[in-house]
Image (cartoon, helix red, strand yellow):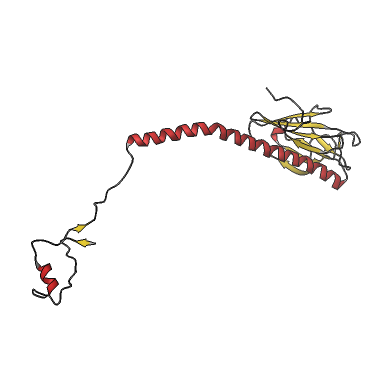
Amino acid sequence: MMYWPDPGNDSDARAGTGEGEGAGNAPVNAPDPGRRLVGMAAPHCLGLTLIELLVVLGIAAVTTSVAAPNLHDLVQAQQLRTASGELYGAIQLTRAQAIARNERVTMTPNDPFGRDWSRGWTVFVDRDDDRRLGDGDQILAVRPPLPRGLQVDYSFTSPAPPQYIAYNGAGRSCSATNSAASRPGTLSLFHGGQIRRIKINMLGRARLCNPARERGCDGAATPS
């Protein structure tokens, strides 16, 4: 830091040569509080004008409006993947429990009329073979309702409600009244224009597929 000497005071020159009163005791380069500092700029604040701020907000609003539909589609796609994966897992659980217990295990929608799988589902041991959860039945798993807007279509032999999926002790999909009767079918999930299907074959094996990418993944048409 440089100091600008006061031209009206020649004591600085005498201080350098040891002249003047008290020259031996005063520091040669001691700063004088009254002197001006060279190279120090006055502090100031930088900011945006109102016009600049409005332009930035406008650009942010346009960007958000463009990205919002894509984000909505991504959310729906993720919800569909999650729901189809959980439904597929519940079917696998029903089959595994039937094999482990060597008895028929049933899975039904949590709908009073036994039709709407989007209301969730319950896996249980149907002791009285009525395809409905009762007091004497043993509950194995329960799934709450699916996200709003997600629809499930059911296409099995004898599709009259209450709808159900049942497995016998051999791990084969069967009728609720006859464990020896095979019962293949398809569950279709629809959400945001996308589809996933779960197909159960004659042996009771389930397969999760995407009709947009895989062959042999046919099923119910998209609901209107």
Residue 137 makes an appearance in the image: no
139, 186: nearer the viewer: 186
Residue 44 makes an appearance in the image: yes
- Total residue callouts: 0
Residue 37 percent location from the top left of the image: 20, 58
Kindly indicate the quadrant of the structure image that contains residue 147: top right
Residue 116 percent location from the top left of the image: 72, 30
Kindly indicate the quadrant of the structure image that contains residue 81: top right
Residue 64 percent location from the top left of the image: 49, 34
Query: On the picture, is 44 further left or further right than 131?
Result: left
Query: On the picture, is 67 further left or further right than 197?
Result: left
Query: On the picture, is 11 further left or further right than 169?
Result: left
Residue extending farthest to the right is 180
Where, quadrant-wise, is the C terminus in this rendering?
top right
Residue 92 percent location from the top left of the image: 79, 42
- Residue 30, relative to residue 93: is it above or below? below
The residue at the point 73 percent across, 24 percent down is 221
- Residue 107, relative to residue 44: is it above or below? above
The residue at the point 16 percent across, 60 percent down is 4
Residue extending farthest to the top is 224
Where, quadrant-wise, is the N terminus in this rendering?
bottom left
Residue extending farthest to the front is 17
Kindly indicate the quadrant of the structure image that contains residue 130: top right
128, 57: nearer the viewer: 57
